[in-house]
Image (cartoon, rainbow, N blue to C red):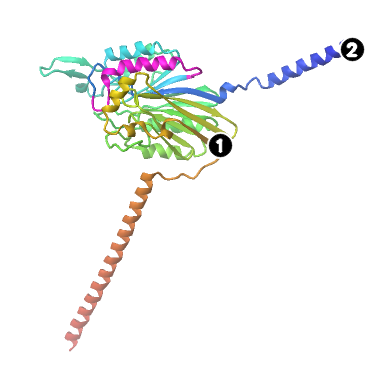
Amino acid sequence: MKNKFLKTFLFLIVALFSINSARADFSFNDMELKFAQVTDVHISDGQDTAYKVLSHSKELFKDTVQTLNKIKGLDFVVFTGDMVDEPTGALYREFFTTLSKLNHPSLLVFGNHDSAFADAELSELTDENGNVIKSLLDKNTVIDIITRSNPYQQFGSAYFAFSPNKDYRVIVLDTTINERTTSNGYISEEQLNFLDNEISANQDKIIIIFQHHPVIEPIKSEHHRMINPESYLEVLQKYEKVPIAIFAGHYHTARIIRKGNVIHVASPSLVTYPNAFRVVNITNYNDRVIFQFRMFETNLKEIQEISKQGLIASVAFQGKASDRNNEIMIRKGYVPKIKPTKEEKQAIKQQKKAQKKAEKERKRAEKEAKKALKKQQKLEKEQQENIEG
């Protein structure tokens, strides 16, 4: 009896070991990805503006880091641009001093405030007598600072890609324009090819993209928009069955827009009401992907109130409830019908109206032309009759 029991026990041990060995390449950690998105920190020594409480930027950043350190299970924290309000060595020192207290890995994305422009005349700020007040750092210098200051970002480039686990591919893009003073964004041909190749090679993964400028505007702003979004969207349209989420900042507003299997996420700034950041949890199942969005506001409520009072339309920056906390499911292998937004419906309506007006004008012109032709033919006939008579 004892030998029989021992054989049964050993059989079960072997069986369990075989099952575990067969599934050794599987992990629940591969199914999930949890990260925080912080954007437009704007570390500054300056005064408040119409919509940025710059004088409180350092306090808000420290409060954010303290809150992030209390959140468990974060794979990383990504800062989607405008780390500083001006790209000076002193402000970057402030930024990285606070960042060093973060207990999670971090990634840094370039915003339009984060480096000086290529034009040498714009690399220094001078007073009325021509004396240099402060020197601004160019992009290569900032990349070098990031590489030396952040052990988690050793790519040596403003755009790159990596896999945090086997189910996900993270792509970081640089949408800033270096050639001129502008707040507009642009995606270069080189990066479009990079984006295309990355998605093409990772169609079996969930694609997560981080950049500063949104592809789809959360609110209309001619001076903030990406100037060639059509080229970007053409790349995305090639992969309509691949679940993709794009996270951006720049507009200082909260907005979540779904277009088919692509989720466009714009997040608020730390220095603009509601002075908040996002935590995103993604779960990858065999047949679907679940995206969970949660917004965390600052604990510094007095500063938040000051920020709110400085805005004419604080609701626009805060977004709707669904723009702050939401859950979205994307079914794999299924291409949903894309519903047009209110703005797109209005544009379609105006286009149809313009086409109808143009068609009406065409028919009128055609009628007038026929009428003129008949008149001309009648005149020629009368002239011919007079000649013959």
Residue at the bottom extreme? 389
Task: Give percent across and percent down for residue 329.
Answer: 52, 35
Q: Is residue 269 left or right of residue 32?
A: left
Lower position in the chain sequence, tag 1 or tag 2: 2
Q: Is residue 310 left or right of residue 158?
A: left
Q: Residue at x 30, y 59 (%)?
A: 357
| Tag of residue 332 | 1
Of 204 and 324, which appears nearest the observer? Answer: 324
Amino acid on which the number 2 mark rests in the picture: Met
Location of the N terminus by quadrant is top right
Q: Is residue 54 left or right of residue 188?
A: left
Q: Which residue is mark 2?
A: 1
Q: Which residues are magenta?
A: 49-75
Displayed quadrant of residue 126: top left
Q: Residue at x 17, y 85 (%)?
A: 386
Q: Residue at x 40, y 11 (%)?
A: 101
Amino acid on which the number 1 mark rests in the picture: Lys
